[in-house]
Image (tube, rainbow, N blue to C red):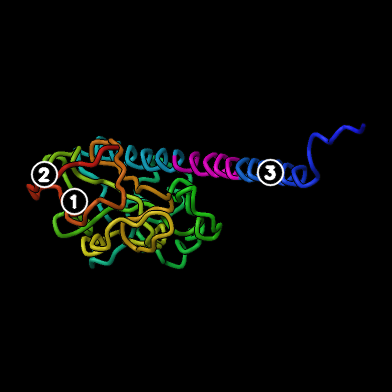
């Protein structure tokens, strides 16, 4: 008398497909986890590097103020006729890249025939590490002041710490931006450009914005770092940009 098979052919086929499906799901899960891991490992160091760069730029501004009667570097300098010459990025080079600083002619406009040779020699500290375009990394700054209309004065006027009535810890000094600003050009962000709100990741914008997916970093006038997200309102941005507006504002947690 022959023994009956433990599993019928139909049952074997069902078992085979179930095992195969489980293995396929396992492989897909491992691929997704690997992708998430590598994406995190690639993005997170760039976030940290960006924060570090912005912090260093803030410290350079603070050291410049400490060395010059508690006055911030101006948004930009002008000649005797009021023509813009150089912005704060160039002026604080003495704390960041003194060799390059010595080469630039500060008594000539930023776009003079001589100074134009430095337009594509931007120090890497001015470019967010998440900017992948190499030509952009050499020419366009990722960090800006907010100027005019109660914010940092636009032009050669210098802000004294004693004038910051809202408190230095409550007032933005520098912020990330998606606006393509040639690094030597006397240009920053206006209060009107804050009306776009915060632009993170793939969201388009030419005001306050970052390539990072979830936040935009800023350094305050006391050197502390803060993170702004998409929920940060335009009203909050403008209140944080003014130094003596007297607004009541809840500063976002880092």
Observer-nearest of 147 and 233: 233
Q: Is residue 144 visible?
A: yes
Q: Residues within 10 Å of mark 1 (few under 14, many from 20)?
A: some
Q: Would residue 79 be seen by someone viewing this image from the given angle?
A: no
Q: Position of residue 186 (x, y in %)?
A: 32, 61
Between disc 3 and disc 1, the foreground one is 3
- In the rendered view, tell whether residue 80 sits above or below residue 100: below
Q: Report whether 165 appears left or right of 174.
A: left
**Sequence-wise first label, 1 or 2:** 2
Q: SS at mark 2?
A: helix
Over which residues does the magenta segment extend?
32-47
Q: Which residue is mark 1?
A: 236
Q: Which mark is residue 41?
A: none
Magenta stretch secondary structure, dominant: helix
**Residue 42, magenta (yes or no):** yes
- x and y percentages locating residue 245 in the rendered image: 9, 50
Q: Position of residue 182 (x, y in %)?
A: 41, 61
Q: Earlier in the sequence, mark 3 or mark 1?
A: 3
Q: Tell me the tag on residue 163.
A: 2
Cα–Cα span, label 3 and label 1:
55 Å
Q: Quadrant of the C terminus?
A: top left
Q: Which residue lies under the disc numbered 3?
A: 18
């Amino acid at each position: 008398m022959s023994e009956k098979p433990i599993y019928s052919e139909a049952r074997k086929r069902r078992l085979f497909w179930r095992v195969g499906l489980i293995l396929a799901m396992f492989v897909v899960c491992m691929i997704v986890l690997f992708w998430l891991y590598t994406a995190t490992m690639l993005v997170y160091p760039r976030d940290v590097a960006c924060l570090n760069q912005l912090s260093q730029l803030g410290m350079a501004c603070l050291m410049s103020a400490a060395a010059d009667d508690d006055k911030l570097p101006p948004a930009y300098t002008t000649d005797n006729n009021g023509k813009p010459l150089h912005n704060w990025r160039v002026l604080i080079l003495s704390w960041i890249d003194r060799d390059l600083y010595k080469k630039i002619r500060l008594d000539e406009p930023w776009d003079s025939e001589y100074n134009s040779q430095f337009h594509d020699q931007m120090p890497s500290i001015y470019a967010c590490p998440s900017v992948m375009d190499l030509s952009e990394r050499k020419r366009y700054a990722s960090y800006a002041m907010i100027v005019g209309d109660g914010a940092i004065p636009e032009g050669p006027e210098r802000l004294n710490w004693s004038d910051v009535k809202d408190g230095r810890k409550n007032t933005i000094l520098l912020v990330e931006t998606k606006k393509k600003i040639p690094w030597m050009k006397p240009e920053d962000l206006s209060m009107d450009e804050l009306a776009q709100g915060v632009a993170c990741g793939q969201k388009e914008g030419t005001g306050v914005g970052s390539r990072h997916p979830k936040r935009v970093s800023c350094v305050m006038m006391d050197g502390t770092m803060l993170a702004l997200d998409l929920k940060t309102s335009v009203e909050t941005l403008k209140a944080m940009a003014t130094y003596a507006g007297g607004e009541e504002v809840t500063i976002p947690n880092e």
